[in-house]
Image: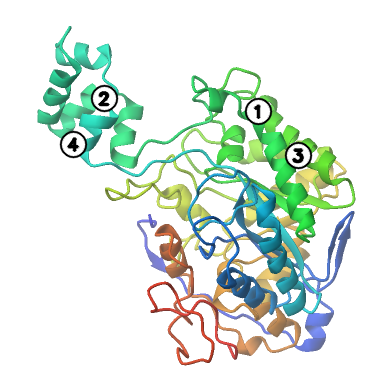
Amino acid sequence: MWHPPQRIAFKAAPGRIPTREEAAASRLFSPLHHGPLELSSRTWVPAMVPWRADEEGHVTDAVVDWYASLASGQPGGIVIEATGIRDVPSGPLLRIGHDRYIEGLRRVTEAIRRHSEGRTRAYVQLIDFLAVKRRPERAKFLERFLRITDHHRDALGMSGASDQAVRERLQALDDDALQGVLDAREWEALHKGARERVTDTALAHIRDLPQVLPGLFAAAARRAREAGFDGVELHYAHAYTMASFLSATNTRDDGYGSALDARLRLPLEVYAAVRAEVGAGWTVGCRLLAEECIAGGSTLDDAIHFSLGLARAGMDFLSFSRGGKFDDAKPPKVGEAVYPYTGVSGYECMPGYLSDAQGPFGRNLAATGAIRRALREAGLATPVVAAGGIHNFEQAEAVLAEGIADIVGSARQSIADPRWWKKLREGRGGSVHQCEYKNYCEGLDQKHKEVSCQLWDRVALDEPGLGRSRDGKRRLVAPKDW
């Protein structure tokens, strides 16, 4: 992952630890009621992909154990990882694109209710994504994957030459010369792997996304309701399809791109289809970006515009992240896929302990607070979820006291100590294991390995019934006495 050049080392601190009585009187542990969204406290675990599904996208025992562990901390809400709405191969990522997934997902919702003693609401994040190919070997790309055109012939002065003759000439070029012959997308396909964009409307399946996606999201939401979830979070953030429609880089000219309202059109149509499918009494919210953090990307002003539109449409909550884009991601190794959290925007999404003077904690709070103020000034009471490096009671309480958000999300700290919310509520904050923000978990995610925490994944390896990673070296959940 990219790091700011200053590389200032920060350390997360527990801050002031509340007594049981202080926690009980706090905003953080007060309930929230807004339409169908009802939380026992304003604590929230955002979606994280732990890579524990099987290769067909089914729930496994390891998936159930992961969410049972998070539920033991009794947060107000847990958002289940990004779950694919299409019935297509996607590796060990959970899927909800067919009714056969409902039974397995029901195991997750039942485990969350059981292990939280009924305190935690369960939501599932619904995601769509476009094709991303692995970075190819140079020779293989030029010999097999590159489509030879007259553009290449003209650049090489080889008018009328055969495709094979052009390929052989390209193979002989050094990288500087080759970059002068290939167009930007071809160069990217060579060094990062080919990637579909929502602007590739020459492809029928991309052109037809506005007609296809509302129905896919609605069907997935119906399955989520049948599986016992309390609601869904529509994934409109980061590098994926719906966020790409919202992005300022979306230049579609079919009414679904370029202008702000045109970029918002499909997200609103997806929401309308989902709401029509599940009704008004079931929670539907979304995750979106406060800022894209890329050159030419969407800004805070864009996010405010989108948030007002989504809130007016009836979203039950808005949860904010930032960055995490393919646009500035580092080239992967040959044979690996590009990872959207390796550039500057990726750092803004998941900043580590090595940072600039601003530090890694709460980098998205100013933007989130600005969005919430705009909502309230417009007379909209839609609950806002803030997240990003929040790891102690003082931080979380301040987010609520200062009107930055209505709900506080914490991802990496919840991995480090899944029971930290419960410990804080019971006045046992001194026993919380503090996240070090070294992004060990993010490194595992990048390699699609089962995510764990370096604080606990090699602790108590003789624990009875312990589930281990596929290589047998790491535990898959925090110790029972953690």
Residue linked to disc 2: 182
Q: Is residue 372 shown to the viewer in this render?
A: no
Q: Position of residue 223 (x, y in %)?
A: 74, 51
Residue linked to disc 1: 210
Q: Are marks 3 and 1 in contact (CB under 8 Å)?
A: no
For the residues marked 2 and 3, what is the alpha-carbon distance in whole angstroms?
Answer: 40 Å
Q: Quadrant where the N terminus lies?
A: bottom left
Residue 191 to residue 261: above or below? below
| Mark positioned earlier in the residue sequence (2 or 4) | 4
Q: Neighbour class for label 4 at 10 Å: few (<14), some, many (≥20)?
A: some
Residue 22 to residue 216: above or below? below
Q: Position of residue 192 (x, y in %)?
A: 33, 41
Q: Residue furthest front?
A: 100
For the residues marked 3 and 1, what is the alpha-carbon distance in whole angstroms?
Answer: 12 Å
Q: Neighbour class for label 3 at 10 Å: few (<14), some, many (≥20)?
A: many
Q: Position of residue 383 (x, y in %)?
A: 80, 54
Residue 63 figure quarter: bottom right
Q: In the structure shown, which secondary structural element does the residue marked by tag 1 occupy? A: helix
Which label lies toward us, 2 or 4? Answer: 4
Residue linked to disc 4: 139
Mark 4 is on which residue type?
Answer: Ala
For the residues marked 1 and 2, what is the alpha-carbon distance in whole angstroms?
Answer: 31 Å
| Mark positioned earlier in the residue sequence (1 or 2) | 2
Mark 3 is on which residue type?
Answer: Tyr
**Which mark is on residue 271?**
3
Which label lies toward us, 1 or 2? Answer: 1
| Mark positioned earlier in the residue sequence (3 or 1) | 1
| Mark positioned earlier in the residue sequence (4 or 1) | 4
| Mark positioned earlier in the residue sequence (3 or 4) | 4
Q: Are marks 4 and 1 in contact (CB under 8 Å)?
A: no
Q: In the structure shown, which secondary structural element does the residue marked by tag 2 occupy? A: loop
